[in-house]
Image (cartoon, grey):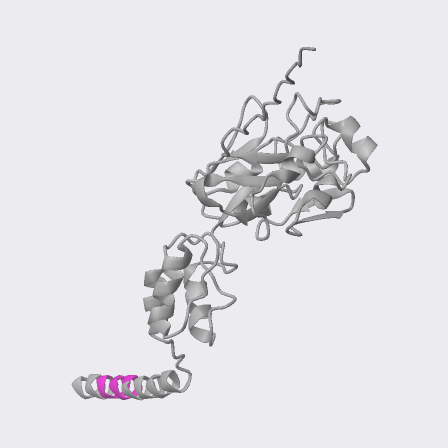
Amino acid sequence: MSITILYTIITLSAIGATAAIILYFVAQKFKVYEDPRIDDVEGALPGANCGGCGFAGCRAFAEACVKENNLDDLFCPVGGNDCMTDVAGILGLEAVKKDPRVAVVRCNGTCEHRPKTNRFDGASTCAIASSVYSGETGCQYGCHGYGDCVSACDFDAIHMNPETGLPEVVDEKCVACGACVDACPKDLIELRKKFPKGRKIYVSCRNKDKGGVARKACKVACIGCGKCEKECKFDAITIANNLAFIDSDKCKLCRKCVSVCPTHAIIEVNFPPRKIKEIPKKETVEN
């Protein structure tokens, strides 16, 4: 009886040892090598996993950085230039500096400017509302105001203004991850160059209807008149589909376009008050 048990133990031990040897060689055969620099790069990233870089998360972005020969097309908007400098140092590459960006809501259709013509009685999300009808006002391009962009933001950088019914971006918290951009079904939110002192000049309208139709729907709609384009000396403004667009990378913040816009569709933010030119009084000459 004891001999049978002994044989069983020896047989099972031999089978186990053989299986272990086979598994070892199989593991060596199909072993996947992972560059240790991936961990180093991931450690240099902010760990937000926001997807603003275009990848699923910081780990995927780190893997992409290690695989590429240069970082020209790779950038972490949350970490910014300092973060990419650290990543470049780990990989022995050169980091390309980019201007910081900030989200901007291109709609000024408040209740005052864009009166409601109907009421939506359905799920209070912009995505659903946009899929079933054009909106509660005469402007089919305007903001629904249900806050999908607010829900998408992981940094508490965008809120709904209860008075205007429009979302507002907190520049100091915005990391330009682009989550709000993707969440807006009307394509109203744009990542623009972040200027010093939070200054901005942009066309706060996305209405592509012709001038008369657009103006009827919203008092401050862009009518595509082209006056701003003619006024700009830096080729920063273009007109397409009855709508003006200001390229923030070319804009010099001269504010001349703001003055000539007949509908006040161009917004200027955080600028000092304009100086009012005094007209000299004519002197009367006594005969």
Residue 203 in view, yes or no:
no
Q: Considering only vertical position in the picture, is 84 above or below 2? A: above
The residue at the point 39 percent across, 85 percent down is 26
Magenta-drawn segment: 9-16
Quarter holding the N terminus is: bottom left
Q: Is 9 left, or right, of 120 in this rendering?
A: left
Q: Is 87 left, or right, of 265 in this rendering?
A: left
The residue at the point 65 percent across, 33 percent down is 259
Instruction: Give coordinates of residue 234: x percent, y percent.
Output: 64, 51
Name the residue at the left extreme.
2
Instruction: Give coordinates of residue 224: x percent, y percent.
Output: 77, 40
The residue at the point 65 percent across, 18 percent down is 282
Q: Nearer the viewer, residue 188 or 72?
A: 72
Instruction: Give coordinates of residue 206: x percent, y percent.
Output: 69, 40
Q: Main secondary structure of the magenta part?
A: helix
Image quadrant where residue 155 sits: top left
Image quadrant where residue 120 sits: top right
Image quadrant where residue 143 sits: top right
Instruction: Give coordinates of residue 42: x percent, y percent.
Output: 36, 63
Q: Is 219 left, or right, of 170 in this rendering?
A: right
Q: Is 243 left, or right, of 166 in this rendering?
A: right
Residue 121 in view, yes or no:
yes
